[in-house]
Amino acid sequence: MKGKRVKRFSLFMIIAVLCGLMLTVPTAVIGAGKPIVIGGSLPLTGEFAETGLWIERGMRYWAEEINAKGGLLGRPVEFKIYDDQSNVGKAVTFAEKAITVDKVDLLFGGYPGTAARAVMPVAEKHKVVYVSMGGHMKSFQQGYTYSFGAPPLMGEWWYEGFFQWLATIPANQRPTRAAVYTINNPVGLSLQDSINRWTKKLNIKIVINEKYNSPLSDATSLIVKAKQMNCDILFSNGFFPDGVTTIKAAHALDYNPKAIVQGIGSVVPAWVKELGADGDFVFSGTVLHGMLNYPGNDKLNAYVKKKYKLDIYPLYFGFGYAWMQTLEQGVTGAKSLNQTKIRDWLKTHKVTTIAGPMTFDKKGLPAPINFATQIINGKVELIFPKNIRTKEPVYPKPAWKK
Amino acid sequence: MDAVLIIQSLISGIMMGMVYALLSVGFSLTWGVMHVIHISHAAFGLLGAYLAYSLLEYFGMDPVVSAAVSVPLLFIVACGVYQLLIKPITKAKEVIVASMILTFGLAIILENVMVLIWKADPRVLTPTYASGALIVGPFYFQYPHLVGFGLSIVGITAIYLFLKKTYTGMAVRAAWQQPEAAQLYGVNLYRISMITFALAVSTAGAGGISLALLNSFEPHSHNLWLIYLFLVVIVGGVGNVIGTAIAGLLIGVITGLAMAFLPYQWVNLVTFGLLMIFLIFRPHGLFKQGV
Amino acid sequence: MLHVDNLTVCYGQMQALRGVSMEVSPGEMVALIGGNGAGKTTLLNTISGLVPPAAGTLSWEGRPLNSLSPDRICREGIVQVPEGRKLFPAMTVEENLIMGAYLPTVRKQRQESLRKVYDIFPRLADRRRQLAGSLSGGEQQMAALGRALMARPRLLMLDEPSLGLSPKAAVEIFATIRRLNKEGLSVLLVSQEVLETLAITVHGYVLENGVVAMKGPSAELREDPQVKMSYLGL
């Protein structure tokens, strides 16, 4: 008797829930076919939340745009985004879940590089195309065929643009002695690659070459050493917190090299906001920029101006958008959601993104992209190559303001 | 190695060490007096740093001035936290374990609240003197470091005098040494625990402000700071104010010297190797426990 | 002055005191004797408010004491010198004494109280800067007693004041207690020095397994064959 009632009650509940679900499905979607679900995870809380949110905004802007145009392969797109809480392990779990449990149609790229690198083998195992930043060269040297960096954030390429620019100034004005301080992690170490190649080429002597572990609680002795050894170029191959500590110490100790080159930290909006004038004249790289003369950038800038009151879209907004652009062209090119077909199309065709046109090699990488940037008057300016220059570089760095 | 580098590293180490000491002294007290290992201690410190940041940004208040506002504020908040969360678990059988689990949760909540209010962006405390330095001969004393150092000395001295010279401070020490006898002479243990806890949280706030004068911070920075808390308290002895101060200085000096003499990537190895050695050979720290 | 009526105290399932009744009159010195585990310390701790009673009443000058916290009971003038002294070992002798005058009611008179305690125990004055943990047993007992006096007690409860002391120090302590009583202080004395205790008290209670086995004037108890056999070893 009791069992029967329970059964009847559950049956009633199931029907009620199903009715409810039907009501929530918009009729338009039924008409246009089942939506294409794009799944994966982003760090929406925790350490990398701020960046993760901008990537999400970029992706959502892309979806808004494509749905307005009638969707992908005639079907609307929607996201299933998990919050991996800035945790690499969770990013992997959610990627597995999206592929095997949710059976999403497409996978989107994550952040930061460490998470992307860990998701790449998962994508390869399930034969799912994965477009992300990758993080550094090693992640693209594992023989994965379904992973693409479009564009990637490649430590090995990060200073290419800077050195190419440095090569253009007369040899007698170039720095001659370099102090290189590098954070002891894969991203930091990947920055050393181009320094080693180019300093040899430009006849710059590496006088100090030291690694430090995070956290860098004090940079006083770093700066004292660089100052004493008369280093006239400082490479601070790290992230925001250690970069800030180093810059503040350099100012306080009145260390004035000809150039300061910063790893990842200086293109983050917080750099300019938090450091103010002290953050000026620092060189770095980038693979994306709202001022680049590629189709789409103006549109994106106009969008963030309207929606977020920003003059130029943030780097990671661009990343989120560009990865989706690549995925979109792969799907439309292959005219299918078959992952292998999408991969094969991407490997053999050119894609056009806001970061420029790209063709991918065996590793899933485009030709090295590298633009030199310098912070000038609180703005990330493009200084090299010359055809995209937004401002004349300031060199040598003016002495610190007292 | 030349003398300037060594001395400059020592100067930095001492200033940094004193700041660690202020950040840790309250952690040591709650652990010693209440047997509460307060995992969210550093998160409260970080809250102090954020308050200083906002007060500087919106009202132009110097961190030292705003400490006069935010530190008492944290004291009141901590009284509430004690009544709501900590007091119920001090009756538990395994107070240490229960408190660690509870305050670990509290730390996560605080971190997310800070993300909501201040976002996950890294922040830098930049008062007007942020990048100035006092130059004495070949040596540089960065102003923010000096201010953080000064704030820390004031904070530690205040805690020390409070414990030594005031009745309430003496009751805190009495409650830690002989809770039963303290009660017999009129000490209300819950009241004393609340004061200890709130005072500890306030010093964490002051320590957080001092540390923010030295380094940048983000909502998750407290996890890192917590490691230093354990390091200082384990070297200095649980509940020992002077021990905490000396341990902080010692760790600062060792870190400073390691930076002068060793490749930088060995510095953390040396510092945390020290922690291991202490845990193995002197689990009660360099100094006697006790307030 | 102090009335204990039909008091029962439990530690979990175990009954430590069962239906204990006793009283202390003003100016009187009362002895509480009994073997180990008879419940003497439990009775003192219940009066002090450290242990909650399961049943029965405690009253002080006609007012109930039952649900008061230890600090409130101390405020009433009921002060205990706990077993094993329980000094604050890492505090100086003087700090220990000052802690005795913690309550605001007696705090104002602390300089005066301090002088009085140093008068009674000049040795404490010599050792005032020394840590309590470094004192000898006799000095520790003096400090503990001095700390209790700082609280300006009206009823002083002493738990085994002579435990672990040299015979000479024990005699000294008992002499002091007696003198304080002569000056008008009510005393409840718990001790295993049965002969000595019964010699200086007026009334006595014998606790056995949590119940009052015997009570009466101390002089009578001293002559009781049962007491002689069990506690005096005669």
Image: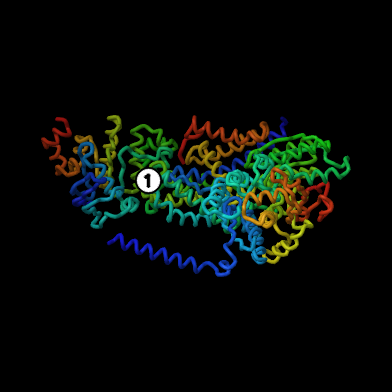
**Model colouring:** rainbow
Using the rendered image of the protein, determine whether residue C169 is visible from the camera's viewpoint: yes
Query: Hey, which residue is sitting farthest left in the picture?
Result: C225
Give the residue number, with chain letter if any, for mark 1. Answer: B182
Taking the spot 85% from the left edge, 41% from the top edge, the residue there is A174
Report the front residue among A197 and C94: A197
Report the front residue among C132 and B254: B254
Query: Would you call the spot at circle 1 few (<14 residues within 10 Å), some (14-19), or many (20 or more)?
Result: many
Taking the spot 61% from the left edge, 34% from the top edge, the residue there is B254
- What element does badge 1 sit on? helix
Point out residue A170 in the picture as x, y percentages from the top left corner. Answer: 88, 43
Report the front residue among A291 and B190: A291
Point out residue B106 in the picture as x, y percentages from the top left corner. Answer: 49, 52
- Is A383 above or below relative to B3? below
Report the front residue among C227 and B261: B261
- Is C139 above or below relative to A84? above
Left or right of A400? Residue A39 is: left
Point out residue B246 in the picture as x, y percentages from the top left corner. Answer: 56, 37
Using the rendered image of the protein, determine whether residue B130 is visible from the camera's viewpoint: no
Q: Which chain contains the residue that carries disc 1? A: B
Left or right of A69? Residue C119 is: left
Point out residue A326 in the picture as x, y percentages from the top left corner. Answer: 69, 54
